[in-house]
Amino acid sequence: MPVACSESQLTGQDGLVMFKPAGTEQCLLDYTDFGPASDTSITVPLTHNYKLGDPVTFSLNGSAKLDSAFTVGTTYYVVAAGEQFVQLSASLGGAVITMTGNGGTTGSGLASAAFAVGFPGAGYANGVYTGVQLVQGVNTTARATVTVTTGVPVVTTITTAGLGYTTGVGSLRLAGGNDGNGNSITAVTPTQVWQGTPALTTRSDTAGAHIEMTYAKYAAVCQVESFTINLTRAKIETTSIPCKVGGGASKYAAFKTYQPGYADGTGSMTVKFTADSNSLANRLLADSMLRSQSGAWVKLYINAVAAGSGTVPDDASSLYIEAPISLEGMDVSLSSSGDTPTTATVNFSVSGLPKHLLSIDL
């Protein structure tokens, strides 16, 4: 296959800018933010910037467990986005995905919800009984609120979780009624007792872990007129006094010594405005005013070599800089003549270690 001669000079026509929008990298709790079973909305922070059609993917931090309606590493698409929620689909414009509610961590405890009692008994005084002890074998730590209506007791709320219970059907007994078989109960210790095997699965967020939801893939910004990027290093002075006798008695002045310090990166992109509110160029301009810049990345191609399909760059053969950035406002130049386009210059700084520098993965 032919290769480019080394004498070829690169020009602007060899360049390309690809972008991931700001506000599209969020850390989510693996149960609370993915809701219960049958829910379709994922809770995201108020600072999110997800738009209709955005491709997103999930990765796990620590031992987090993703709701089984989704798969780690798979690309999904935003089909609805509200102030603090998004809904996803497996394809652009496809059906909304419904959660199964099995993210997070399963624990052994009593669910805080009402459940049926197989043998509740009868003949009790109507009223609401609190702190009812739920007993199953040696397990007596759970407590509940019991409501008696027309003489029949019903467990309405679990107020304190318990450990070691199993699923099944039990009988509820309160002093002053009967056991459901006509046998009078006159003394029970404690006076409010649950005997049986209620359903016990609890689920909570995995401690110290989360799910990362990020923009899945770069997209080309088609209205960039030019870009600049400046990578510099600070210098740290390391000059010291002479370490030998007479070391400072030279005929000539001693020179200071330095070593390189932190790197810094700044740059700008000049973008032409279009009337298309959905264009990535206009989104790049708007993103410069977002408070949260999480998720903003660029690939600045100096030499974009097409892959075999011709629709995406071949990164292995291209020269480019890939880095996370923070957009820092824009300068707008409104045209005063009929044949000059309106442009805006977006300023940015490199906000972390670049992932790729020309031909080197960092």
Image: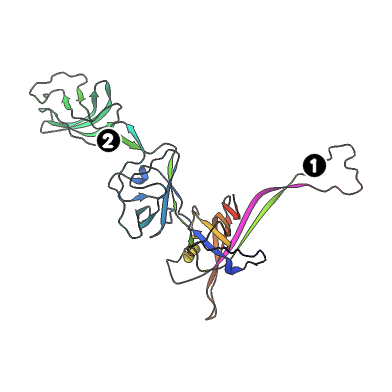
> Given the current orientation, which residue lies at the most extreme right position?
251
Residue at 36% x, 48% y is 70
Mostly what secondary structure, the magenta segment?
strand
Is 1 located above or below residue 356 in the figure?
below
Q: What sort of colour scheme is used for the picture?
A: rainbow
- Numbered range of the magenta stretch: 250-272
Using residue 308 as the reference point, say whether residue 129 is left or right of it: left
Whether residue 267 is in magenta: the answer is yes
> Given the current orientation, which residue lies at the most extreme bottom position?
338
> Residue 148 versus residue 353: which sits nearer the camera?
353
Q: Amino acid at mark 2?
A: Ser
Residue 8 sits in which quadrant? bottom right
Residue at 38% x, 56% y is 77
Residue 107 locus on image (x, y percent): 34, 32
Label 2: how many Cα within 10 Å (few below 14, some 14–19, many 20+): some
Q: Which of disc 1 and disc 2 is earlier in sequence?
A: 2
Would residue 288 be seen by someone viewing this image from the given angle?
no
Residue 357 locus on image (x, y percent): 60, 54
> Residue 349 versus residue 130: which sits nearer the camera?
349
Using residue 43 as the reference point, say whether residue 268 is left or right of it: right
Q: Which residue is mark 1?
A: 240
Residue 125 sits in which quadrant? top left
Whether residue 338 is in magenta: the answer is no
Residue 42 locus on image (x, y percent): 35, 49
Q: Which residue is mark 2?
A: 112
Would residue 94 be seen by someone viewing this image from the given angle?
yes
What is the distance, in whole Å, between disc 2 and disc 1 at their CAs?
69 Å
Residue 113 locus on image (x, y percent): 25, 37
Using residue 161 as the reference point, say whether residue 320 is left or right of it: right
**Quick one: SS at disc 1?**
loop
